[in-house]
């Protein structure tokens, strides 16, 4: 059973956004990409990443395939599906609404 | 897609686990490659097991996965206790199989709609009234002229269909002229079209074949007959055969599946109604009528339209009954018409077996309940021994629902396996039973498909059974108190109360089954061993006919030829054997009609002696005599009063008013005439050739031959030859023994007695097993207590009493309740019983004895074990 997680909303958004820009990344690369893009501010908790990836895969937002890396090891590469793109849009607009609301609160208080 | 992949993942658990592990491993490796410390990377990722499980739960249907886990576990439990499980599966399978077989028969005979179009519109037309014994009797027979009037009257609302009763007929195919028996039915040609039936070959009869009496010598074969007799010969259309001295042309074969409208009989040959010789004979009710209602018509409306025509016809008939008493006339005129839905058709076999088969199905259900109680007890006992395991499961966080499911899954497994065993038993048993209700010359045939109906019933049964024996133990197991159970103590009282209660229930049902079986066996016994007034063993009956009526001298020569055959003690003739046909009429004495009627049989001199019916007074009939008569004691008493009947004259009337006059020359002892169940009724035996004022030649009759020794049938070929040597004009059409005729009247009783006895044995066995199990368990549970009691000086008797008293009391109460239930149940099978009542001591005692013996046998091992407990050993073990 998926567990309720306060970070979950933003984690999903970050992963989806990253994959929409650079499809075919595997777990470690997704993590690194998020950290680098955010200038080391956002660090994905490694323990939460894989359950989240698997959950999104089962939800049909991501599809995964095994690829062979340069060093000959197999890795699971993820990419967005059609449903994943829609989900990304929805997550993005939700996030914007939330940040606008938070800013409004910060300004008025 | 996603649901599917999660479903599939349940069954590839291991490879799924490996995949997840590999992905995580590859993550760590990459981290190490990037220069991170392996230990740190691993810690950052978190505990691998948790991650793996979390991902795994996401990627499959977790409820299905745990169900799979339960199933695997349950299967291991089942395999672990092979002996106990096999006993459960076999006993439950036997019970389920019996239920399935009973359902299969009841369904095929009484429930399954005929495979015709608009079966919901098919209604039977019948008339009913009281007979001379004041019993309400329904009849589906109509005379052809009446049928035609009725058919015309309701043309707008319903189509009336007519069929003759399906009968065995002699058919001769091809030039060989060898006759064979087949079921023949005359039908209204339009019937096939109205039923929406199609030909498999050629054409079917149509309404056009109903036009001219005698003008349509065409016949349609049933698919089954075409297949069985002709190997599906495609050239069959156009061939001819002889039936009742007429030549018929085969015009087609009926589609597969339709076997007639009389469940229990497969009709082989259909011929047009117009070809039946009875068409022109008045006063013969040979038509079975059905109504196919129009879409908007109601059965009552049709009945109301038919009634005035029926009534007018009856009144017309009564006009001829000048001599009949008013009471008889009124009875005839007060008959009423009934139009009732008949989606399953209508047949004698249905009527004969409806109550009996339903009763047998009830007994099968009781046996199933007894078996369920056994399994419930076994599961309870097993749950008790597993209480520590259950407590452990609860302590490490298993939910109650999960525990209930665990036990239920195990029950469902048992039920499914038992259903499989039951299905195998049923596929063997059901045709056996059908075979048992077939008299040798009159096969009963039923469509017994193993189809969705049967499968659905089996599944429903299996679910019900799981519920019955699985739910209580499951709830009990889940309510385990971990602290108490793990400490080693628990509350066994509650569990034992449930088990004891089930023993009581088993005792009750067991008594019902045993007593019912006793009643049915008793009925068969009384019927078989009653005094029939004649001696059946060694009697051989040769039905004979000739093309032209033969004088008494010809019949006498044939009789003498038979009597001279080696191995024959005596020979004579009668119109038909006893326990076969019926003839009779109202008796007149001193020019006035008497209160009752008498049976009548034409017999030759020497017949009473051959039958070994003793003479009370007077003499036998003489050769050439045509107005003498033998009467039985019941006749003499009923009609001739106290004075000696010898020499008295009496008359026997027929419905059309004519009367024949006879003088009593001898009085013989009573004998059963037609029906084993009706006892002795007045009968007059008149000369074989009696006629109006002289001898009347006879073209058919039955030679009655008493053979020396009892192996009568072995003589049949020699006797056939003796008849044709003496008088070649006689053809022997059938040979049977008197015993066969008796057996024929007890077919149903034998079947019911055999099935009920079988169920009684199974019920006793299962209930005994149940009692044994419960006592065994209770002795095991109380072994310490018993050991202590022994140690402080309790006697063996005390221990035996301790062990059995409370279970015995429950069983006894159950048995008493069972007797009460039996009295209620016996009422519903009253029509099947003969001279036995459930309250008879002769019925109660054997049932009580059987149940008591089974209980004692079941209790003995446990009591012996309890008494044999060595206190020292038990106490040392603690």
Image (cartoon, coloured by chain):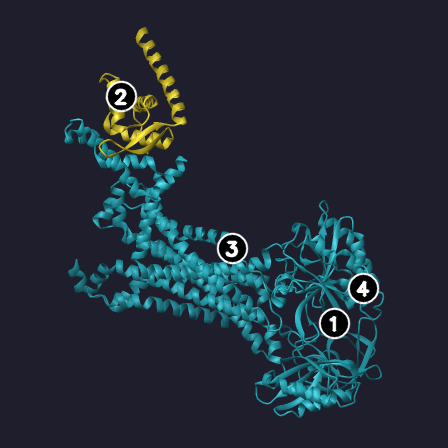
Q: Categorize mark 2 by other alpha carbons within 10 Å: few (<14), some (14-19), many (20+).
A: many
User: For the N terminus of chain B, which image quadrant?
Assistant: top left
* Tag nearer the camera, 2 or 3: 2
Left or right placement of residue B810 versus residue B741 in this view: left
Is disc 4 in the same subunit as disc 2?
Answer: no
Return the residue at label 3: B454
- The label shown at residue B215 is 4
Of B321 and A58, nearer the camera is A58
Quadrant of the rendered structure where residue B665 is? bottom right
Chain letter for mark 2: A
Q: Is residue B654 visible in the rendered structure shown here? A: yes
Residue B146 image offset from top left, x and y in percent:
80, 60
Of B696 and B190, nearer the camera is B190
Report helix, strand or loop for mark 2.
helix
| Residue B204 vertical placement versus B30 (above, below) | below
* Tag nearer the camera, 4 or 2: 2
Q: Colour of chain B?
A: cyan
Return the residue at label 2: A34
- The label shown at residue B244 is 1
Residue B846 image offset from top left, x and y in percent:
46, 71
Q: Distance between the Cα atoms at labels 3 and 1?
A: 41 Å
Of B480 and B649, nearer the camera is B480
Label 4 or label 3, whichever comes before in sequence order: 4
Q: Distance between the Cα atoms at labels 2 and 1?
A: 100 Å
* Residue at the far top in the pictured view: A108
Left or right placement of residue A85 versus residue B686 in this view: left
């Amino acid at each position: 059973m998926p567990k309720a997680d306060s970070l979950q909303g933003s984690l999903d958004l970050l992963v989806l956004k990253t994959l929409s820009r650079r499809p075919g990344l595997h777990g470690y690369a997704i993590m690194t990409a998020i950290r680098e893009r955010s200038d080391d501010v956002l660090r994905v908790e490694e323990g939460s990443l894989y359950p989240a990836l698997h959950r999104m895969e089962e939800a049909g937002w991501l599809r995964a395939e095994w690829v062979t890396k340069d060093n000959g090891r197999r890795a699971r590469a993820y990419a967005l599906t059609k449903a994943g793109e829609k989900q990304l849009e929805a997550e993005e607009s939700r996030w914007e609404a939330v940040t606008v609301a938070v800013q409004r609160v910060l300004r008025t208080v | 897609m996603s649901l599917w992949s999660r479903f599939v993942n349940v069954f590839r658990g291991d490879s799924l686990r490996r995949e997840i592990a590999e992905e995580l491993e590859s993550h760590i490796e990459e981290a190490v490659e990037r220069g991170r410390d392996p230990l740190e990377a691993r810690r950052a990722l978190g505990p691998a097991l948790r991650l793996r499980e979390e991902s795994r739960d996401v990627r499959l249907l977790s409820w299905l996965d745990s169900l799979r886990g339960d199933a695997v576990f349950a299967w291991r439990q089942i395999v672990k206790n092979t002996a106990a499980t096999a006993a459960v599966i076999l006993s439950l399978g036997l019970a389920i199989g019996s239920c399935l077989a009973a359902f299969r028969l009841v369904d095929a005979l009484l429930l399954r709609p005929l495979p015709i179009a608009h079966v919901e519109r098919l209604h039977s037309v019948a008339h009913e009234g009281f007979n001379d014994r004041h019993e309400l009797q329904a009849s589906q027979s109509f005379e052809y002229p009446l049928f035609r009037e009725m058919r015309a009257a309701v043309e707008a609302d319903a189509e009336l269909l007519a069929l003759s009763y399906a009968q065995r007929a002699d058919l001769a195919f091809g030039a060989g002229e060898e006759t064979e028996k087949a079921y023949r039915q005359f039908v209204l040609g339009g019937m096939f079209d109205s039923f929406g039936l199609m030909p498999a070959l050629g054409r079917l009869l149509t309404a056009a074949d109903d036009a001219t009496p005698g003008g349509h010598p065409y016949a349609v074969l049933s698919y089954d007959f075409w297949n069985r007799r002709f190997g599906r010969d495609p050239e069959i259309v156009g061939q001819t055969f002889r039936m009742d001295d007429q030549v018929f042309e085969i015009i087609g074969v009926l589609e597969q599946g339709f076997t007639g409208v009389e469940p229990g009989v497969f009709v082989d040959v259909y011929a047009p109604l117009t070809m039946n010789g009875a068409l022109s004979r008045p006063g013969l009710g040979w038509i079975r009528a059905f109504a196919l209602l129009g879409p908007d018509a109601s059965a009552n409306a049709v009945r109301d339209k038919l009634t005035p025509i029926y009534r007018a016809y009856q009144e017309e008939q009564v006009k001829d009954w000048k001599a009949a008493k008013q009471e008889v006339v009124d009875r005839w005129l007060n008959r009423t018409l009934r139009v009732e839905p008949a989606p399953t058709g209508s047949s004698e076999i249905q009527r004969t077996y409806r109550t009996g088969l339903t009763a047998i199905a009830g007994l099968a259900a009781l046996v199933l309940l007894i078996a369920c109680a056994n399994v419930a007890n076994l599961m309870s006992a097993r749950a008790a021994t597993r209480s520590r395991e259950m407590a452990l499961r609860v302590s490490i966080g298993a939910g109650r629902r999960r525990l209930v499911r665990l036990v239920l899954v195990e029950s469902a497994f048992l039920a499914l396996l038992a259903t499989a065993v039951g299905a195998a038993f049923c596929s063997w048993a059901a045709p056996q039973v059908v075979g048992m209700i077939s008299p040798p010359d009159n096969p009963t045939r039923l469509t017994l498909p193993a189809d969705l109906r049967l499968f659905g019933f089996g599944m429903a049964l299996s679910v019900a059974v799981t519920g019955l024996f699985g739910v209580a133990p499951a709830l009990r197991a889940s309510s385990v108190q971990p602290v108490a159970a793990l400490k080693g103590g628990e509350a066994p009282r509650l569990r034992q109360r449930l088990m004891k209660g089930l023993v009581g229930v088993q005792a009750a049902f067991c008594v019902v089954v045993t007593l019912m079986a006793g009643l049915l066996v008793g009925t068969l016994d009384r019927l078989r061993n009653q005094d029939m007034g004649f001696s059946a063993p060694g009697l051989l009956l040769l039905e004979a006919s000739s093309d032209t009526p033969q004088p008494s001298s010809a019949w006498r020569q044939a009789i003498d030829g038979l009597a001279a055959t080696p191995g024959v003690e005596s020979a004579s003739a009668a119109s038909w054997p006893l326990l076969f046909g019926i003839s009779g009429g109202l008796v007149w004495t001193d020019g006035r009609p008497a209160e009752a009627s008498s049976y009548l049989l034409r017999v030759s001199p020497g017949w009473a002696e051959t039958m070994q019916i003793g003479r009370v007074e007077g003499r036998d009939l003489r050769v050439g005599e045509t107005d003498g008569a033998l009467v039985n004691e019941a006749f003499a008493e009923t009609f001739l009063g106290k004075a000696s009947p010898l020499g008295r004259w009496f008359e026997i009337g027929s419905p059309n008013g004519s009367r024949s006059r006879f003088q009593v020359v001898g009085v013989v002892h009573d004998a059963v005439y037609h029906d084993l169940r009706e006892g002795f009724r007045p009968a007059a035996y008149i000369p074989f050739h009696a006629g109006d004022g002289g001898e009347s030649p006879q073209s058919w009759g039955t030679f009655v031959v008493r053979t020396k020794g009892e192996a009568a049938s072995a003589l049949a070929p020699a006797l056939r030859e003796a008849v044709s040597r003496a008088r070649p004009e006689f053809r022997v059409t059938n040979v049977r023994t008197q015993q066969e005729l008796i057996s024929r009247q007890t077919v149903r009783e034998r079947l019911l007695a055999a099935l009920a006895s079988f169920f009684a044995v199974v019920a006793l066995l299962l209930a005994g097993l149940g009692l044994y199990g419960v006592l065994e368990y209770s002795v095991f549970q109380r072994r310490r207590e018993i050991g202590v009691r022994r140690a402080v000086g309790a006697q063996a008797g005390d221990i035996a009493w301790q062990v059995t008293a409370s279970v015995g009391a429950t069983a006894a109460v159950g048995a008493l309740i069972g007797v009460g239930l039996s009295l209620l149940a016996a009422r519903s099978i009253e029509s099947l019983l003969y001279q036995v009542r459930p309250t008879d001591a002769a019925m109660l005692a054997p049932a009580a004895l059987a149940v008591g013996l089974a209980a004692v046998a079941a209790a003995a091992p446990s009591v012996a074990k309890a008494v044999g407990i060595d206190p020292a050993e038990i106490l040392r073990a603690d």
